[in-house]
């Protein structure tokens, strides 16, 4: 039977005003109907930018839109009551809530502290100056608006490895805090980009501090008592020691839920790096398939010259499908964002068909592709741009097709540089499908379905083709597809 489907229910430019939690609750019933099994929610806690925070500038993990902090009670997405209602509504419709966990750093410190730092080379963080100097940094987090509710833990300079902003003297860069942890070095078991990619932004958390380690485990238990939790999406995993998440996931599965769904954002296109990380975390989680996303980007730019037989080359899906969460787009890759590698709109139906109609991997659907998005922002050149991300019109039908027809054994027919087919053979209880797609001209794929389909009539569930295909007496048929398009052919008597 068709597997789970993850929907990322936000994008980077989702409007301010506290509306998202309400929209989640409003759309839950429809999402269940079209086959969404899990919804990835944005960070639910207060960010340094208050009501304008997308959520990745973590300030207070324990403020779920409940306290007057950073100029607001609600977060950008709504208040605590609305969050609770959204998660409960999802659960009532059989949809799991997957919560975003942003542990790597804190921002918006409440008080300055006198600190000692050593300057690091931003381009090679392993090059740290021997001489330390005294300065001030905003490394003390007391959360005055919360006043010790839910947790009395106060974060200070001993809770962090480094900062990027100091005062007296005022300067920016990468500064290693001098403290008792790590003998002046960054954490291990992180990505080797820039020498050592422990440090990313803000006040970087020191996971080797046992008090910090226990506080973050406590937060996980506490949070899971506040709202329904089906799993977690782990932010910035390449910057966090693998041993920490190895321990944290194990602890959460023991204390909260044995079958928690966990996917980590280890944003690296190299399969070797992803496989190494999986080993370090004892293979306890899934990873986003960055390589496949880049293949989709390249294919969308290449048009008919791209060899579709190679679409899965270099992907986690091809190497370790049981650990792959496949995606077409997300909040970091959308236009004007930090990892921009947008997939052209014409190709998105093909890309979604490739991840939704096959058995392997857990597909992730992006809010802007399901509902559309438009926004204005500056590009890397400093100019303002108006961006329109049109919704993928056939995406709801593709989701429904996965739910209803992506059943039984699978045969991939990747024997043509432009036209591919995915055959799902169905079961005695559930019908199958023939998905045909091409990045070139109108084409067709000859499929031998067997005598069980002799004389059967097939229709395109997506409605891109209006003709009917009838199998011959041996169950063989040629299934057509429009140029640069996709069709999902299903038996007419299964509709």
Image (cartoon, rainbow, N blue to C red):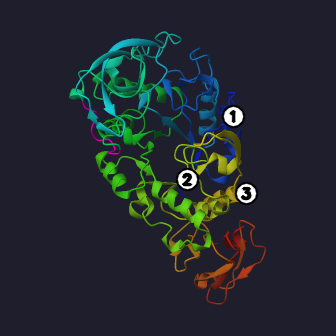
Q: Is 191 inside the magenta-drawn segment?
A: yes
Residue picked out by circle 2: 341
In the image as oriented, which residue stretches furthest toward the bottom?
473
Residues drawn in magenta: 185-193
Quadrant of image for the N terminus: bottom right
Disc nearest the viewer among 3 and 1: 1
Picture residue at 63% right of the left edge, 22% below the top: 74
User: Residue 471: where, in percent of width, then height?
Assistant: 67, 84
Q: Is residue 323 above or below residue 448?
A: above
* Marks 1 and 2, how far apart at CA: 22 Å
Disc nearest the viewer among 1 and 2: 2
Q: Is 355 inside the magenta-drawn segment?
A: no
Q: Residues within 10 Å of mark 1 (few under 14, many from 20)?
A: some
Q: Is residue 445 above or below residue 31?
A: below
Badges 2 and 3: C-beta atoms under 8 Å apart?
A: no
Regarding residue 435, the answer to whether it shows in the image is no
The reply, left or right, for residue 241 in relation to residue 396 is: left
Quadrant of image for the C terminus: bottom right
Magenta-drawn stretch, dominant element (helix, strand or loop) = loop
Q: Nearer the viewer, residue 117 or 104?
A: 117
User: Residue 45: where, in percent of width, then height?
Assistant: 53, 26
Q: Is residue 123 above or below residue 3?
A: above
Residue picked out by circle 3: 393
Q: Nearer the viewer, residue 215 or 290?
A: 290
User: Residue 434: where, in percent of width, then height?
Assistant: 62, 73
Pointer 2 or 3: first along the chain: 2
Picture quarter containing residue 181? Answer: top left
Disc nearest the viewer among 2 and 3: 2
Picture residue at 44% right of the left edge, 48% below the top: 267
Q: In the rendering, which numbered label is found on residue 15?
A: 1
């Amino acid at each position: 039977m068709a597997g789970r489907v993850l929907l990322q229910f936000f994008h980077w430019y989702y409007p301010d005003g506290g509306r998202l939690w309400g929209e989640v609750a409003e759309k839950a019933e429809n999402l269940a109907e079209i086959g969404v099994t899990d919804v990835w929610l944005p960070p639910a806690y207060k960010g340094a930018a208050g009501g304008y925070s997308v959520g990745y500038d973590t300030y207070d993990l324990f403020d779920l839109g409940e306290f007057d902090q950073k100029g607001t009670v609600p977060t950008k997405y709504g208040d605590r009551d609305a969050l609770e209602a959204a998660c409960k509504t999802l659960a009532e419709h059989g949809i799991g809530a997957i919560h975003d966990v942003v542990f790597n750093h804190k921002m918006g410190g409440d008080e300055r502290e006198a600190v000692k730092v050593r300057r690091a080379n931003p381009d090679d963080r392993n090059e740290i100056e021997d001489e330390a100097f005294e300065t001030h940094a905003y490394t003390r987090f007391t959360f005055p608006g919360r006043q010790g509710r839910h947790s009395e833990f106060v974060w200070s300079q001993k809770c962090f490895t480094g900062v990027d902003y100091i005062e007296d003297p005022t300067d920016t860069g990468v500064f290693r805090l001098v403290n008792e942890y790590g003998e002046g070095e960054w954490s291990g078991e992180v990505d080797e980009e820039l020498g050592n990619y422990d440090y990313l932004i803000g006040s970087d958390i020191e996971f080797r501090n046992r008090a910090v380690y226990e506080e973050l485990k406590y937060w996980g238990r506490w949070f899971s008592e506040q709202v329904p939790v089906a799993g977690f999406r782990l932010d910035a995993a390449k910057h966090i020691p693998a041993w920490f998440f190895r321990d944290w996931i194990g602890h959460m599965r023991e204390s909260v839920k044995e079958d928690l769904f966990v996917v980590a954002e280890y944003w690296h296109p190299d399969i070797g790096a992803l496989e190494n990380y999986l080993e370090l975390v004892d293979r306890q989680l899934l990873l986003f398939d960055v390589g496949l996303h880049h293949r989709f980007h390249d294919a969308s730019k290449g048009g008919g010259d791209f060899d579709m037989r190679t679409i899965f080359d270099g992907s986690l899906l091809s190497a370790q499908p049981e650990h792959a969460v496949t995606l077409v787009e997300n909040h970091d890759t959308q236009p004007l964002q930090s990892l921009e590698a947008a997939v052209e709109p014409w190709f998105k139906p093909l890309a979604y068909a490739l991840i939704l109609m096959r058995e392997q991997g857990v597909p992730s659907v992006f809010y802007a592709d399901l509902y559309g998005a438009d926004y204005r922002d500056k590009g890397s050149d400093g100019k303002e741009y108006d961006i329109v991300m049109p919704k993928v019109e056939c995406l709801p039908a593709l989701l429904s097709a996965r739910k209803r027809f992506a059943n039984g054994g699978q045969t991939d027919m990747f024997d043509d540089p432009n036209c591919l087919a995915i055959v799902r053979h169905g079961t005695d209880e559930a019908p199958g499908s023939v998905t045909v797609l091409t990045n070139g001209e109108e084409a067709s794929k000859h499929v031998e379905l067997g005598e069980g389909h002799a004389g059967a009539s097939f229709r395109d569930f997506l409605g891109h083709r209006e003709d009917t295909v009838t199998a011959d007496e041996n169950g063989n048929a040629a299934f057509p597809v429009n140029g640069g398009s996709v069709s999902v052919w299903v038996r007419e008597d299964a509709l």
